[in-house]
Image (cartoon, rainbow, N blue to C red):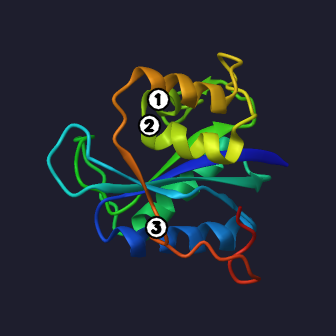
């Protein structure tokens, strides 16, 4: 069984799309570890603010199969892919980490550089995997976040009750 961490984001119908993604991920993978939801401004374009969170899950699939399933969930929630990286998104699901794997190809980049580049990824990751270590740097995510926060202008707001993070049989375990 492998441990994967996924970044979730949306700035179009944010609550519904993120809640729908959590339901789809729980149906496929069971219990999830779920961070708080954070609001952040879009980067590289003008538009509505994003809601972002990070989840952890256990899987027996390969990183390639997991990535393909994430693309399918995005499509089911109205994600349209194009050449422009900096556009509004109904749903964005990014494979951030897969165990301690370091792997790069045309479709997969783990650990994803977003982990150390963006507050909206690193902060929620440090919340649910703070003592785990980055496979390339060896630093724990809690320390990486503290260093990032101290050296960057961080504009990130926790959003209470933005989406349902319940723990029961139909939703799986959350932390």
Q: Secondary structure at mark 3?
A: helix
Q: Secondary structure at mark 1?
A: helix
Q: Are marks 2 and 3 in contact (CB under 8 Å)?
A: no
Q: Residue at x 75, y 34 (%)?
A: 131
- Mark toward the start of the polypeptide (2 vs 3): 3
Residue 111, x across and y down, in percent: 59, 30
Q: Are marks 2 and 1 in contact (CB under 8 Å)?
A: yes
Residue 18: image tag = 3
Q: Residue at x 60, y 55 (%)?
A: 35
Badge 2: few (under 14), some or many (20 or more) residues near its Cα, within 10 Å?
Answer: many
Residue 29 sits in quarter: bottom right
Q: Is residue 24 left or right of residue 170?
A: left
From this viewpoint, is residue 57 visible?
Answer: yes
Residue 108, x across and y down, in percent: 54, 35
Which residue is identified by label 2? 119
Q: Residue at x 53, y 56 (%)?
A: 70
Q: CA distance from mark 2 to mark 3?
A: 18 Å
- Mark toward the start of the polypeptide (3 vs 1): 3
Q: Nearer the viewer, mark 3 or mark 1?
A: 1
Which residue is identified by label 1? 149
Q: Residue furthest front?
A: 150
């Amino acid at each position: 069984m492998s441990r994967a961490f996924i970044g979730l984001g949306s700035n179009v119908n944010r609550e519904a799309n993120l809640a729908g993604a959590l339901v789809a991920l729980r149906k496929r993978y069971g219990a999830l570890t779920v961070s708080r939801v954070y609001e952040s401004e879009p980067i590289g374009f003008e538009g509505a603010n994003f809601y972002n969170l990070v989840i952890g899950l256990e899987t027996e699939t390969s990183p390639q199969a997991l990535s393909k399933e994430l693309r399918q969930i995005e499509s089911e929630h109205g994600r349209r892919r194009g050449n422009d990286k900096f556009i509004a998104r109904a749903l964005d699901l990014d494979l951030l980490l897969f165990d301690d794997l370091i792997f790069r190809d045309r479709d997969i980049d783990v650990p994803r550089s977003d982990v150390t580049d963006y507050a909206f990824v690193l902060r929620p990751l440090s919340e649910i995997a703070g003592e785990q270590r980055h496979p390339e740097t060896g630093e724990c995510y809690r320390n990486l976040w503290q260093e990032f926060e101290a050296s960057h202008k961080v504009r990130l707001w926790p959003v209470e009750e933005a989406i349902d993070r319940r723990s029961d049989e139909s939703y799986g375990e959350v932390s």
